[in-house]
Image (spheres, rainbow, N blue to C red):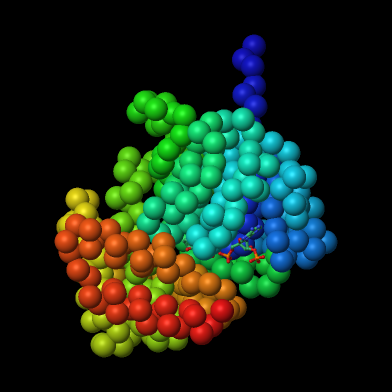
């Protein structure tokens, strides 16, 4: 008789739009999922998590294994970090509390080198991975999440005890397998750093312009001036990535532009941060790519102007 393989215990560190959505999908697929919350703890402990998903319908998880303190969480084999990159350095104590020995810590976040500040605070025994989420999801109210479109997660290895390629690939495949078991599209990324640059081709123009111009994707794509601005910013990111030694497939920016025209009207997560007076993810999405390109002797003046404008807005907003 075949033995059954134990399914991993999963911890969600930061149960917002991303953490809540993927946590609910994994719990519904039968995984043992534990959710760390902060401001929404009482609401979720009392009423559960509710996801209104255009592709999957109305999904309710109640009761939720919800925690306001990581000390109370069981040891988790996988920790999915769904907090904003602005809090990464503060999350290390919670991750250490909730991590099983040799746990895999997967950062479901946008931006460049987001793993680095956390990596240096974690022991070498923990694996750190990066996850890129291609999804339109936001918090509607405490414990209530709206999922408008898409849902794929791409997973890549960052650092940790797996030193050789095959071991790293096996861990990445395990991560990919979690999302696929929950009915979601997921792929392994061979080059996490390059993939993070490629995703910025979307996030640099749309996240920042949504805040600066107070506009979601539909009006941004309908206006001749904002269309030109988006194309020019995208072109600069592509050239910055190439200057830093990365590949960007031919026609990649044009492809993202076309995909956005077909997307439902969408406010990027940076706009939600602006609206709720939370810090914007400016270091991860703007400052680091600007610094990396500069170090490679490539200037990105349009992105720099956008970054400086957003920094001004951010300081007055929080
Ligand atoms: N939303 C989207 O569609 C997409 C988002 N992303 C990226 O995913 C990441 C997460 O974004 P998103 O889900 O939208 O963000 P949210 O603001 O919706 O969620 C962040 C969550 O983290 C919680 N949190 C922060 N610090 C702590 C802490 N110390 N302890 C416990 N909980 C904490 C917040 O709690 P509190 O309420 O108390 O602040 C909140 O619930 C970002 O990097 C974003 O750029 C990527 C692709 C798409
Ligand atoms: C809109 C989309 C799908 C772009 O990749 C996204 O994932 C994001 O908001 O970061």
Which residue is depicted at the point 77% across and 45% down? Answer: 72
Horizontal side, residue 45 vs residue 104: left or right: right
Q: Quadrant of residue 3?
A: top right
Which x, y percent locates residue 19? 59, 56
Residue at the right extreme, as displayed:
46
Which x, y percent locates residue 228? 23, 81
Which x, y percent locates residue 227? 27, 81
In this view, 221 is above or below 43:
below
Which x, y percent locates residue 316? 51, 85
* Residue 108 seen in the figure: yes
Instruction: Point out the image quarter for the N terminus.
Output: top right
* Residue 170 seen in the figure: no
Instruction: Point out the image quarter for the C terminus.
Output: bottom right
Which residue is depicted at the point 64% across and 47% down? Answer: 93
The residue nearer to you, when weighing 238 against 218, is 238
The residue nearer to you, when weighing 189 against 193, is 193
Which residue is depicted at the point 57% across and 74% down? Answer: 278
In this view, 198 is above or below 213:
above
Horizontal side, residue 56 vs residue 291: left or right: right
Which residue is depicted at the point 65% across and 27% down? Answer: 6
In this view, 190 is above or below 248:
above
């Amino acid at each position: 008789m075949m033995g059954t393989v134990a399914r991993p215990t999963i911890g969600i560190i930061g149960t917002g739009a991303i953490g809540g959505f993927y946590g609910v999908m994994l719990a519904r697929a039968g995984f043992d999922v534990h959710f760390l919350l902060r401001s929404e703890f009482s609401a979720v402990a009392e009423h559960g998590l509710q996801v209104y998903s255009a592709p999957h319908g109305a999904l309710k998880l109640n009761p939720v294994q919800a925690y306001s303190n990581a000390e109370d969480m069981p040891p988790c084999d996988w920790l999915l970090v769904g907090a904003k990159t602005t809090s990464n350095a503060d999350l290390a104590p919670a991750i250490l509390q909730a991590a099983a020995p040799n746990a895999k810590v997967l950062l479901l976040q946008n931006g460049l080198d987001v793993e680095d500040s956390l990596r240096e605070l974690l022991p070498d025994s923990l694996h750190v991975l990066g996850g890129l989420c291609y999804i339109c999801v936001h918090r509607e109210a405490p414990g209530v999440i709206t999922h408008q479109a898409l849902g794929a997660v791409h997973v890549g290895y960052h650092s940790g005890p797996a030193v050789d390629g095959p071991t790293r690939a096996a861990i990445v495949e395990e991560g990919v397998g979690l999302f696929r078991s929950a009915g979601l599209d997921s792929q392994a990324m061979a080059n996490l750093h390059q993939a993070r640059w490629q995703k910025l081709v979307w996030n640099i123009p749309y996240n920042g312009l949504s805040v600066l111009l107070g506009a979601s994707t539909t009006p941004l794509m309908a206006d001749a001036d904002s269309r030109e601005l988006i194309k020019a910013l995208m072109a600069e990111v592509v050239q910055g990535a190439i200057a830093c030694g990365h590949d960007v497939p031919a026609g990649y920016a044009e492809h993202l532009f076309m995909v956005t025209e077909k997307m439902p009207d969408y406010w990027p997560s940076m706009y939600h941060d602006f609206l709720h007076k939370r810090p914007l993810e400016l270091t991860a999405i703007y400052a680091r790519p600007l610094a990396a390109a500069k170090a490679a002797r490539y200037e990105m003046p349009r992105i720099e102007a956008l970054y400086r404008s957003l920094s001004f807005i951010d300081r007055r907003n929080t």
